Structures are given as C-alpha cells and as structure tokens.
Image (cartoon, rainbow, N blue to C red):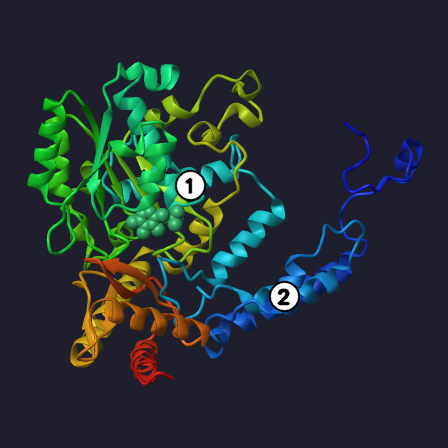
Amino acid sequence: MSSAPPHGHASTADATDLLTRERSLDPESWDAMRALGHRMIDDVMTYLASIGDRPVWQKPTASAMKAYAAPLPIGPTSPDRIYDEYLEHVLPHAIGNAHPRFWGWVTGTGTPMGMLADLLASGANMHAAFGDQSATHLERQVIGWFTTLFGWPATAGGLLVSSGSTANLTALTAARDAMVPEFIDDGAGSTNGAPRVVYASNEVHNSVDKAIGIIGLGRRQLRRVETDDQYRIVPAALERAIAEDRAAGRRPICIIGTAGTVNTGAIDDLDALARIARRERLWFHVDGAFGASLIVSSRFRHLLNGIEHADSIAFDFHKWFYVPYDVGCVLVRDQATLQASFSPPASYLAKLDRGIVGGGVSYGGLGADLSRRFRALKVWMSLKEHGADRYGEQIDQNVAQAQYLAGLIEREPELELAAPVPLNVVCFRFAPTGVDGEAKDALNREILMRLQERGIAAPSSTVLGGRFAIRAAITNHRSTRADFDVLVGAVLDIGHEVVAGL
Ligand SMILES: *Cc1c(COP(=O)(O)O)cnc(C)c1O
C-alpha cells in the first residue's frame, strides 16, 4: 500500500507550521457568513411563499448533470460561489414535494418553522445519543406526548428515527427478541429449524419485507394474508393462516396491522387484529407510517380503534405531520424491549452518578444509531407552533380534498376510480371508451410521465388488480381544491392528446 493520499496531493505543511498557524473551519469573516446566511433565509422564504408558481419538477439539465459529476474539490471555494452553484444546479432540480401539486408516493411538504428548527439543531450541532441534555429530554417529551395520545401505559417509550422503514425495522427487531429471546445471541440457529412467521395483509409496505430479511427471519416467513374489496386484511383468513402454520410446526410470532396502506389508504381492523394477537399470544405491530397521524383528528381517530392494544407502532412525522425530512418514530408498549435488543454492554458508554451521563435517556441504546441528530427539536417546535388540534384539521382537510378529487373523477365520464377512497389516497385512470387492457395501461403511463415532465402535477402510480393506475396520495398542506381541478383538467387534455397520437 502506498502511503500517498489517494488523490495524489501531498500536504506541504509540516507539523511545526500546523502548530504555529492553528486554524479552525470557522469562516474567515463572520460578517460575510452572517450576510450569506441572511441571504439564504430571504431566498428560501421567497421560494416557499411562491413555490406554487413554479413547475413541480424540472429534469436536471445537461449542465446540472455535469456539475453533479465534478470531482472532489481539493482546494477551497468561496461560500458565496458555492451558494450560487446551489441556486443554479441544485434547487431548480428538486423532486418537488414541497409544491402544492405534488402527490406522488407518500411524501411530506415541510414547513418554514420545521426548517428553522433544523437550522437551530444543526447550528448548535447537538447530538441525541445520550446524556443529561436538552436534546434527550425533548425527545423523551415528544415520545411521551404520543404514547399518551395512543393510550399507552407509563412503561411505554420509543425513539425518533430516520424513517418509517427504520421504525418498522426497529419495532420488528424488538418483536423478534421479545418472542424468541435466544435469537439475539444465537441467531437463526436458535430456532431449531422451526421458522418464525410474521403476518400482514397482501397490501403490506415493502419496508416490512426488507425488515424481515434484515433481522434474519427470512422474507419467505412473511405471510401475506388476503384483503377484502376495501383492501383491508380479512381477519378470518389470518386466523386460518396462523392455524395452518402451527399445524405444520412453524412458530407464529407477530401480526402486523397497516393503518393507511400505501396503495389505497386502507386501514386494517386493528381491534380485530389485537384480539387475535392476544388470543394467539403474538406481538402486535402497527405500521401507521401516515395513517397513525389520524390520532390527532377528532373526525377520524376512531379509525385507529384497537391501536391502544398494539405492542409497537411505526409512523412518520415527515409524512402526514408535515415535518421536514427526516423524522420517523417507533413506539413500544414497554421501552425495556428496545433496550433488550439494542443495548449490548460497552464500558465507554457506562452511566455515572453525576455529570453529563448522570441523567437523560440513552437513545443510542434503543435503536441502531448511536450518534443521531436532534430530530426532536423540529417536531417539538412544529407541534407547539400550531397545536395538535390544527394538525388534526389539516389532516381532515386532506381527506376532504381526496373526496373532492374522487368526486371530480366520478363526474367525468372519461375518468374512472381504480379503488375505493377511504382516506387520502386516490387511484384513478383515464378510461375513454374502447381503450382497455394493456393499451389503457400504456395510455395512463404516458399521461403520468407527461404530467410530470411538464411540471404540471406529480402524482405517482401503482398497479391494482393487475392494471396500472395514476395515484395521488394527499399529505400536502399547501394543496387547494384548485390544484385538483388543474390535475383533472390536465389528465383529460393530455389523455386526448395521446389518444390523438400527438
Ligand atoms: C411510507 C411508508 C413506509 C416507509 O416510510 P419511509 O419513511 O418512507 O421509510 C412504510 N409503510 C407505509 C404504509 C408507508 O406509507
């Protein structure tokens, strides 16, 4: 191995130089950096206040792609110039989820206050790994707000994570270790060849498949149970599947209910699932990535009935709580279960009687990350800014908008709904008479791509009953009814254009 730096650039400073001219990475001129910071804040506020006037998405240009391919900078660039590059090549090619007509996948909009909270969290650069410090205490407070909302006992706890996917992974790890305690030390060998089985509906999110694979149960041990015509799990089919697995010598360990399926927004009967889990002595996990937000909605909270019996819940603040990326949340009925999975001994992390590690929750011992950002601040500030009731109303507004969009589609003879609209997800198609099957799929794919390429609106897509559908998931606090009018008008216009061969 050569000892030369990989980029072949030898440093010229010797050790004496380094100590006689000590430097830091702070700006040479605090005044210049302050002015640049003010400019950035002004620009981003203007951007957000007028975002609806811009295209939703613009494909990165050739010159932007060239900028993205530039090699590692070896020498310095001035902060002003770096910011200019950001304005020229980065900001214009954002995916667009802050825009009022972005309804693709399930994305979050963000808020100015949430953004400022992240500025403060990064500015002070507090980590939230452990310690008697504000970051861990605020996280404990936010977690406590939600375990209380979900009706859980004082033993409950949890932590903020990077995403709903990681929240599912964290909860399912705790479930595995609570149900198969020897797994954590002995691994798959501890199961004596008897597969451990996890149950969910066939509408389960693929982050659960990922998690089951990662935690070593094997993806094939995720049983996908049939759903009804509303895309909800069929409890009787679940009971049958559990009985069949037991009869065949397999070992059921966990039932997963989905509150808000990604395809259509369906909510499983959580009460029925809780009863089956209790009777069968299985861990009951709820994936409520966006649907669990209904807990703050006085109108729709009842749809989550039964969630109070769950052993764990995964949900996102960055989806239907509109908090900027990234922040997901995993809650467990008994915080000790997370500790059992994620706190192997480490002398360098031992608590002391007093001092920095004399208090505070050790979040590094409740999840996979030790070093972790101060995510609680933006959740804490956002919930204070508007209050929980306002979040409930904002969520209700999105559901009302989904009904509005569904109504527009139903009244338009050339459009069809592709699935029921129980919540905030609307799946539909352009369906002129005489176009069916694969031709209809191709037509709708083309419409969707043109909608996005022209920057008009950004729904995404899915496949329902084997057929392609345009899909709008409304978790956007900036959308108004007029935005849905624009969507429907553009789908019809582009549809006619494609049919005419233009
Ligand atoms: C979005 C989503 C996830 C994954 O959450 P991320 O934050 O994107 O990782 C899991 N389950 C459901 C139902 C989702 O909608």
- For residue 349, which quarter of the picture? top right
Q: Position of residue 404 (x, y in %)?
A: 22, 74
> Which image quarter holds the C terminus?
bottom left
Q: Position of residue 499 (x, y in %)?
A: 30, 81
> Are the two marked residues, 2 and 1, in contact with CB atoms closer than 8 angstroms?
no
> Which image quarter holds the N terminus?
top right
Q: Is residue 347 above or below residue 109?
A: above
Q: Secondary structure at mark 1?
A: strand
- For residue 323, which quarter of the picture? bottom left
- For residue 3, which quarter of the picture? top right
Q: Which mark is residue 56?
A: none
Q: Residue at x 72, y 65 (%)?
A: 35
Q: Circle 1 sits on which residue?
A: 160
Left or right? Give the position of 300 relative to 452: left
The answer to whether one can see residue 143 in this image is: no
Q: Residue at x 70, y 64 (%)?
A: 36
Q: Is residue 50 above or below residue 472?
A: below
Q: CA distance from mark 2 to mark 1?
A: 34 Å
* Camera-side residue of 359 and 496: 496
Q: Position of residue 114 (x, y in %)?
A: 48, 57
Q: Position of residue 154 (x, y in %)?
A: 29, 31
Q: Circle 2 sits on which residue?
A: 64
Q: Secondary structure at mark 2?
A: helix
Q: Is residue 496 above or below residue 344?
A: below
